[in-house]
Image: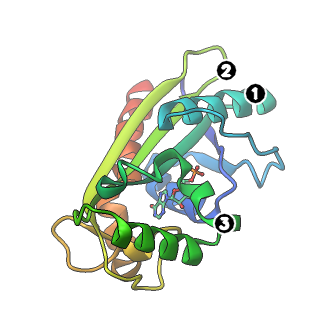
Amino acid sequence: MKITKLVVASHNDGKVAEIKTLLEPLHIEVLSAKELRLGDVEETGKTFEENAKLKANALSLMCGLPCLADDSGLCVDALDGRPGVYSARYAPNRDFKTGMEMLLKEMSESKSKDRKAHFCCCLALACPNEKVKIFEGKVEGKIAEEPKGEKGFGYDPIFIPEGYEQTFAELGDDVKNQISHRRLALEKLIKEIKEAK
Ligand code: IMP
């Protein structure tokens, strides 16, 4: 399907802003579910893929347009992959300052001293009358000893991507958007949309 307009099925302003920037090369109109006043969809799935599919399909049915949903999260090795799909809900009332403190405390109490972690992003593209398509991206890294940096959103202040010494929140958008889990997943999506043009 040739896509000229795309609705991003997220109410997270930080995430929508990142997706809009990354999709600029496509020169298509990108709108958010919030801008269209579409309701939020409950994430009842157990995996990133299930949640992304659920959100993209539901939104596409509501508005009749191609919809892109992102389900993403931080997976920490020492915590057996948690918070993972529950990353947003792990932080009480989406207060990520408290969420990061809780996570660092859990890690300090864990037997494992492993600080390895990764961000995962699963994108689902739902176009009316078509089977939903999935694109995935992952960025490896480690958890910092304490939150650092003011940029970005969510858990950015405690995530140091592989090959860097600073957190995503210190590195800022220009660097993050080159290497992030969302960037890698969106690259696959962009390729698909370009080929359909
Ligand atoms: P959801 O995909 O809306 O369920 O939210 C995933 C949650 O994972 C976000 O609210 C963030 O807390 C976290 N997350 C996902 N991607 C990132 C990122 O790039 N930086 C920081 N936190 C992220």
89 up-or-down from 71: above or below:
below
Q: Are marks 3 and 2 in contact (CB under 8 Å)?
A: no
Circle 3: residue type: Pro
Residue ID at (70%, 55%): 11
Nearer the observer, 156 or 4: 156
SS at badge 3: helix
Specify whether 159 is left or right of 164: right
Which badge, 1 or 2, comes first in the chain's sequence?
1
Q: Is residue 190 visible?
A: yes
Nearer the observer, 51 or 130: 51
Q: Are marks 1 and 2 in contact (CB under 8 Å)?
A: yes
Residue topped by disc 2: 128
Label annotation for residue 92: 3
7 up-or-down from 19: above or below:
above
Instruction: Decide: few, some or many residues near mark 1? Use Cα within 10 Å; few <14, some 14-19, many ≥20.
Output: some
Q: Position of residue 100 (x, y in %)?
A: 49, 73
Specify whether 183 is left or right of 12: left
Q: CA distance from mark 3 to mark 2?
A: 35 Å
Label annotation for residue 132: none
Looking at the image, is mark 1 or mark 3 nearer the viewer? Answer: 3
Residue 114: quarter of image? bottom left
Q: CA distance from mark 1 to mark 3?
A: 34 Å
Looking at the image, is mark 3 or mark 2 nearer the viewer? Answer: 3
Label annotation for residue 64: 1
Which badge, 1 or 3, comes first in the chain's sequence?
1
Specify whether 55 is left or right of 71: right
Quarter containing the N terminus: top right
Direction left: furthest residue = 163
